[in-house]
Image (cartoon, rainbow, N blue to C red):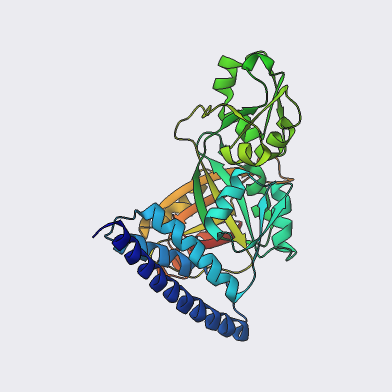
Amino acid sequence: MNLDDWRSRINDLDNRILQLLNQRAEAANQIGDLKRRQDTPSYAPEREAEIFRRLTASHDGLLGAEAIGAIWREILSACRALESALTISYFGPPATFTHQVALRRFGSAVSYRPAKTIADVFDDVEHKRADFGVVPVENNTEGAVNVTLDRLIDSDVLICGELRLEITQNLLSRATGLDGIKRVLSHPQGLAQCRGWLAQHLPDVATEQALSTAAAAETAATDVTVAAIASDLAAELYGVPILRPAIEDNPHNSTRFLVIGRHPSGPTSRDKTSILFAMRNEPGTLYRILEPLARLGINLTKIESRPAKGRPWEYVIFVDLEGHRDTPPVSSVLREIGERTLFLKVLGSYPAL
């Protein structure tokens, strides 16, 4: 076959793909009608997680898992929009890392609502200004995002998904060289992730906290003496050159994000459950609380403590464990933990990464 023959074959394949996509869209539209009559949410994270897992596990062609995920993300986003319009709140402004991960989860066929603070994302979801929110919860270099943990304590929202993003921090500036920089701006996490590089290359330059990495880039766009630590997407969106790429101290720098909503997610083949509890300040208490996990063979994947508000030297414990709260082993262990704590709150069960 020559070039024209192959192009003709591609045209035929494109026509067949388009026909199948329209058939899928019609099926999604019918599902949307059923969901509206049954008053059930249009977005089912457990269903979408299983679709991605099935497609990436069963393919044997030239396309890799990442490419398949990117293609189906937009297919699902477009078909989901036929079922119901979604609004997604995220820690903004546009081009933050949270914005990037929101796009990766929900695709382009939704309405995005940037929030000035992480607390505002929770407020948007709680007050139904948004269907779902996306917030950072921990970085593998700097640890927990405390404002997210604090809001999870008091909020009625549920965790219904998680995502992880490899973080590359860049130094953005309109200055022609490092000697022209008088201030470095970024979100506190961005500054912390690059403190070693800053100490080596800009030891005498003042650092200032911004509401977000994108907000720092926005400031750097208007002041030639300012540098921002932000993403390459922020550099592109705000028109600020990357003066030094990849300045993060940890080359494996990554951040975990949560999707929060008002409805629980159903079980899949691989889930995670997040809980928090308070306990008595007595020797062996934590061991007694977590003992059912070991006895029932349930893996604990994370434990984190936060000071209890208004109770000096008392702590709230955050725990992530494998499994869904609606499955017998996990429901049993949660019942036992609840009997051994001062209070127990299940933050949500959701598809694991």
In the foreground, 54 or 342: 54
The residue under the point 72% across, 62% down is 126
Give the vertical position of 110 relative to 27 (above or below).
above
Name, please, the residue furthest toward the left.
1
In the foreground, 30 or 46: 30
**Residue 160 screen position, x and y as percent:** 55, 62
Q: Is residue 284 visible?
A: no
Rendered image quadrant of residue 173 = top right
**Residue 211 screen position, x and y as percent:** 72, 39
**Residue 232 screen position, x and y as percent:** 57, 37
Q: Is residue 328 left or right of residue 230?
A: left
Give the vertical position of 84 relative to 234 (above or below).
below
The residue under the point 55% across, 43% down is 138
Q: Is residue 153 left or right of residue 196?
A: right
Q: Is residue 52 left or right of residue 342?
A: left
The residue under the point 59% across, 64% down is 109
**Residue 140 screen position, x and y as percent:** 50, 38
Rendered image quadrant of residue 226 = top right
